[in-house]
C-alpha cells in the first residue's frame, strides 16, 4: 500500500490509502486531511497500523513534529486509531473534539488531555485559515459525531458522510450521491434517526464549495445541493423503516 497525496483546496492535502481487500473488487479508500497553517491540523489520524505509512506521507509535506491539532469525526479506529502515535511524534499537538467525544472516550484514551470544542467554536490555524467545529450527533453514526468546516476555502471535512466504495479521483465534480446511496445499501453504516435529515440540512446552510470525504473522492461544486439530496435520501430510508409515519 501507498498513500497518495493531492491538494484538494488551498492548503488542504488529502492523504489517501486504497485497500483493495475491503469491498472487492472496487476496494475502499481511507482519506486523511492535512490543513496547513501556522498551527497545522490533521483530520483523521488513520488506523494505528497505517501510522508508519501516513507518517511518511505527511513528512513529504511538513515536519510531523510541527503538527499542532489532531481532530476527527468520531471515536472509531479508522478515524483516530493512531491518535496517540501522532501525539508522541508531535509534542505540542492537542486532540480537539466536541464535548461528548471528550467525555465518553478521549479524556481517558488520549495520552494528553484533549481540547474540548463547543458547537460552533472556531480554531484559528493562522495564515487566515479558520476552522469551525459543528456537532452532528448520531450523524452518520456515533453519539460523539462532529465535523469541521474550513471557512477560508469553504471545505467541509465530512467524515463518514457520502461513504462509498472504489478508488476514484482525488477530486471530482461528478455525482457523489449515487455512489453514496450504493455505499449505504452495501454497508448499512448510518444510525438512522429522526434528526438525521435536519442535521445534514443544517450543514448545507454553510454552502460548502468542497466536500472532503473520508471514504471516496472529494467533491467540488454545489455542496449545499449535494447535502440536501443526501438528507432527502436518509428521510426516505427512515420513512421506509417506519410505516406508521406515513399514515395520514
Image (tube, grey):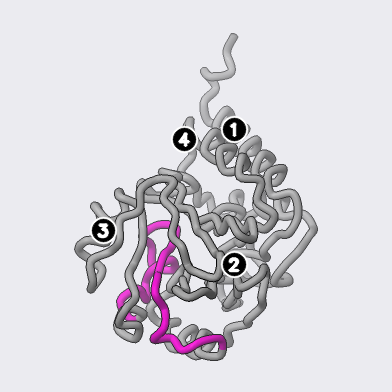
Dot 3 falls on a residue whose secondary structure is helix
Which quadrant is home to the C terminus? Answer: top right
User: Local crowd at mark 3 within 10 Å, few (<14), some, or many (≥20)?
Assistant: few
User: Local crowd at mark 4 within 10 Å, few (<14), some, or many (≥20)?
Assistant: some
Query: Mark 3 to mark 2: distance in Å?
Result: 29 Å
Q: Inspect the magenta stretch and tell me whether residue 84 lies in it.
A: yes
Q: Residue at x 60, y 77 (%)?
A: 18
Query: Mark 2 to mark 4: distance in Å?
Result: 26 Å
The mark closer to the camera, 1 or 3, is: 3
Which quadrant is home to the N terminus? Answer: bottom right
The first of marks 3 and 2 along the sequence is 2
Which residue is under mark 1? 235
Q: Quadrant of residue 198?
A: top right
Which residue is under mark 2? 23
Which residue is under mark 3? 105
Which residue is under mark 4? 193
Q: Residue at x 48, y 45 (%)?
A: 139
Instruction: Say which mark, if any, is on residue 130.
Output: none
Residue 122 in the image: above or below residue 86:
above
Region of the chain picked out in magenta, as a range: 61-85
Number of numbered discs present? 4
Q: Residue at x 34, y 67 (%)?
A: 95
Query: Mark 1 to mark 4: distance in Å?
Result: 9 Å
Q: Residue furthest left?
A: 108
Amino acid at each position: 500500500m501507498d498513500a497518495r497525496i493531492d491538494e484538494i483546496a488551498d492548503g488542504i492535502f488529502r492523504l489517501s490509502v486504497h485497500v483493495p481487500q475491503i469491498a472487492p473488487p472496487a476496494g475502499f479508500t481511507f482519506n486523511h486531511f492535512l490543513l496547513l497553517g501556522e498551527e497545522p491540523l490533521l483530520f483523521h489520524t488513520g488506523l494505528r497500523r497505517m501510522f508508519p505509512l501516513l507518517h511518511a506521507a505527511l513528512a513529504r509535506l511538513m515536519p510531523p513534529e510541527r503538527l499542532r491539532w489532531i481532530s476527527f469525526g468520531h471515536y472509531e479506529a479508522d478515524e483516530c486509531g493512531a491518535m496517540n502515535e501522532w501525539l508522541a511524534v508531535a509534542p505540542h499537538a492537542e486532540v480537539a473534539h466536541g464535548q461528548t467525544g471528550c467525555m465518553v472516550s478521549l479524556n481517558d484514551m488520549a495520552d494528553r488531555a484533549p481540547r474540548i470544542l463547543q458547537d460552533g467554536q472556531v480554531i484559528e490555524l493562522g495564515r487566515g485559515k479558520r476552522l469551525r467545529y459543528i456537532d452532528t450527533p448520531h450523524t452518520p453514526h456515533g453519539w460523539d459525531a462532529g465535523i469541521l468546516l474550513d471557512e477560508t476555502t469553504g471545505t467541509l471535512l465530512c467524515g463518514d458522510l457520502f461513504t462509498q466504495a472504489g478508488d476514484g479521483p482525488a477530486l471530482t465534480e461528478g455525482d457523489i450521491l449515487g455512489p453514496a446511496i450504493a455505499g449505504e445499501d452495501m454497508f448499512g453504516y448510518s444510525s438512522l434517526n429522526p434528526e438525521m435529515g435536519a442535521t445534514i440540512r443544517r450543514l448545507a446552510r454553510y454552502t460548502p464549495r468542497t466536500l472532503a470525504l473520508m471514504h471516496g473522492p472529494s467533491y467540488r461544486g454545489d455542496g449545499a445541493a449535494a447535502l440536501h439530496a443526501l438528507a432527502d435520501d436518509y428521510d426516505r430510508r427512515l420513512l421506509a423503516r417506519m410505516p406508521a409515519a406515513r399514515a395520514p
